[in-house]
Image (cartoon, grey):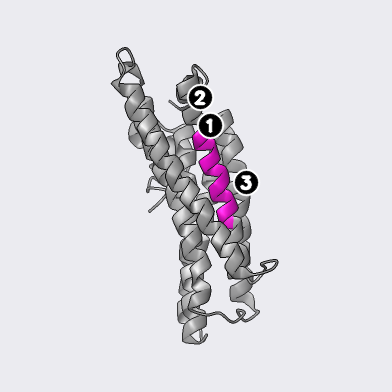
Amino acid sequence: MLRELLRIFGSSDPLRAMGDNFGRMLDLTREANLSAARIFFGESVGSADAERARLHERDAQVNALEQTIRRQVILHLSLPGNEADVPYSLLLMSLVKDVERLGDYAKNLSEIVDIRPDPLPAGPLLDDLRGVRDGVEKMFAAVSHVFRAAEREAALALIRDGRTLARRCDRLVTRVGRGDCDAGTTAALILATRYYKRIGGHLLNVLSSVVMPLDKVDYYDEDVAGVDSAGAGR
């Protein structure tokens, strides 16, 4: 399914424009998530407010691109002779929503500092969260290439890593909840962990399009993916 979608993207100017816009969405949301992490972990160079403003600008661009792709899909399908592209158009509409949500979670992550503006206390919990961050950012860095190249084996490896990372997030939330941090620190750590899990989940949904048929995008067959069959973004 995905290989056919990529072939269609390269077949004519209007369809190529859809593919270019989708790739731009991926790039913008990756930039937004890196920026959100710098804000949350107190690593911003210069003003954190200025960095957040740039993040919101990127998210607005993502939203505009999503709407543009929707219009492009509708226009393409309204033309006689394009009926065969309906399945691929449905796949694209599903994927652009996942990518749009990546921008929303970046904003959510950046906003946690409003709850607890002070630096988070050093220790095993923060170290584990930094490990989650690293795992999600590495997956984000690989997703665009793996998607564009439709590299099935690489997608399967990332899916397995992503599911492991999701379970790590669940364990971290439990540890934080049972710990003795103050309320603000507890809220910040739990929210950040949950947002990273959701970011990873939406990346897994995009990857699922590389290995699964249209009706199973967001879900995995154990025999195909070698992971549990729960939805990636759940």
List the residue tagged with mark 3: 141
Classify 10 Å Cα crowding around label 3: few (below 14), some (14-19), many (20 and above): some
Q: CA distance from mark 1 to mark 3?
A: 17 Å
Alpha-carbon distance for marks 1 and 2?
Answer: 6 Å
Classify mark 1: residues with Cα within 10 Å, few (<14), some (14-19) or many (20+).
few
**Residue 22 in magenta stretch:** yes
Residue numbers of the magenta segment: 21-33
The spot of residue 116 in percent (x, y) is: 52, 80
In this rendering, position of residue 116 left or right of residue 131: left
Instruction: Give the residue at mark 2.
Output: 16
Q: Position of residue 157 (x, y in %)?
A: 57, 41
Quarter of image, res 48: bottom right
Q: Amino acid at mark 1?
A: Asp
> Element under label 2?
helix
Amino acid on which the number 3 mark rests in the picture: Ala
Q: Where's the C terminus, which quadrant?
A: bottom left
Q: Is residue 165 above or below residue 224?
A: below
Along the polypeptide, which appears first: circle 1 or circle 3? 1
Residue 48 appears left or right of 91: right
Q: Are marks 1 and 2 in contact (CB under 8 Å)?
A: yes
For the stretch drawn in magenta, what is the main secondary structure?
A: helix
Residue 120 occupies which quadrant of the picture?
bottom right
Mark 1 vs mark 3: in front: 1
Q: How many marks?
A: 3
Q: Nearer the viewer, residue 133 or 8?
A: 8
* On screen, residue 3 above or below 185: above
Q: Which residue is mark 1?
A: 20
Q: Foreground residue, 194 or 55?
A: 55
